[in-house]
């Protein structure tokens, strides 16, 4: 059982890292488009998408932590932090 708990915690750590990197990658691409004088409309959509992914990432990670805590038999599902810090 402890092995599964460790796997679940490791996966949450990996997901957290990826959910931090994805909006940043969208923002970098948007900045590249703007700097190159290319599709400003697309750059705006990518910037808004980065915000949406950041917000939804917080939501999904909160639920992931909740279920991970339940799987470990922890009654308080918010044992680490309520939201991931993806910045704004």
Image (cartoon, rainbow, N blue to C red):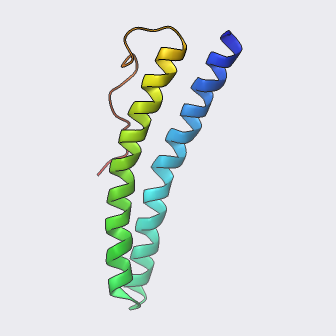
Establish if 70 lies above or below 61: above
Relative vertical location of residue 55 with respect to residue 25 in this rendering, above or below? above
Q: Quadrant of residue 74?
A: top left
Residue 61 % position (x, y): 43, 36
Task: Report the side of 66 relative to 88 (left or right).
Answer: right
**Residue 44 in the image, given as x and y percentages of width and height:** 31, 76
Residue lying at the far bottom in this picture: please name it.
37
Query: Number of marks in the image?
Result: 0
Provide residue 16's location: percent of width, then percent of height.
50, 39
| Image: 39 above or below 16 | below
Q: Residue at x 36, y 25 (%)?
A: 81
Give 71 or 23, whichever is nearer the viewer.
71
Quadrant of the image containing the N terminus: top right
Residue 87 location (% of width, % of height): 33, 47
Q: Looking at the rendering, which quadrant does residue 47 occupy?
A: bottom left
Pick whichever, 56 or 10, lies toward us.
56
In which quadrant of the rendered view does residue 48 lie? bottom left
* Residue at horizontal 57 percent and vertical 24 percent from the top: 9
């Amino acid at each position: 059982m402890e092995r599964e708990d460790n796997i679940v915690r490791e996966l949450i750590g990996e997901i957290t890292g990826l959910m931090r990197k994805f909006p940043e990658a969208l923002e970098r691409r948007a900045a590249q488009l703007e700097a190159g004088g290319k599709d400003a409309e697309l750059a705006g959509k990518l910037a808004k998408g980065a915000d949406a992914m950041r917000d939804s990432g917080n939501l999904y990670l909160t639920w992931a932590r909740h279920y991970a805590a339940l799987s470990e038999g922890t009654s308080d599902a918010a044992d680490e932090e309520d939201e991931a810090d993806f910045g704004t």
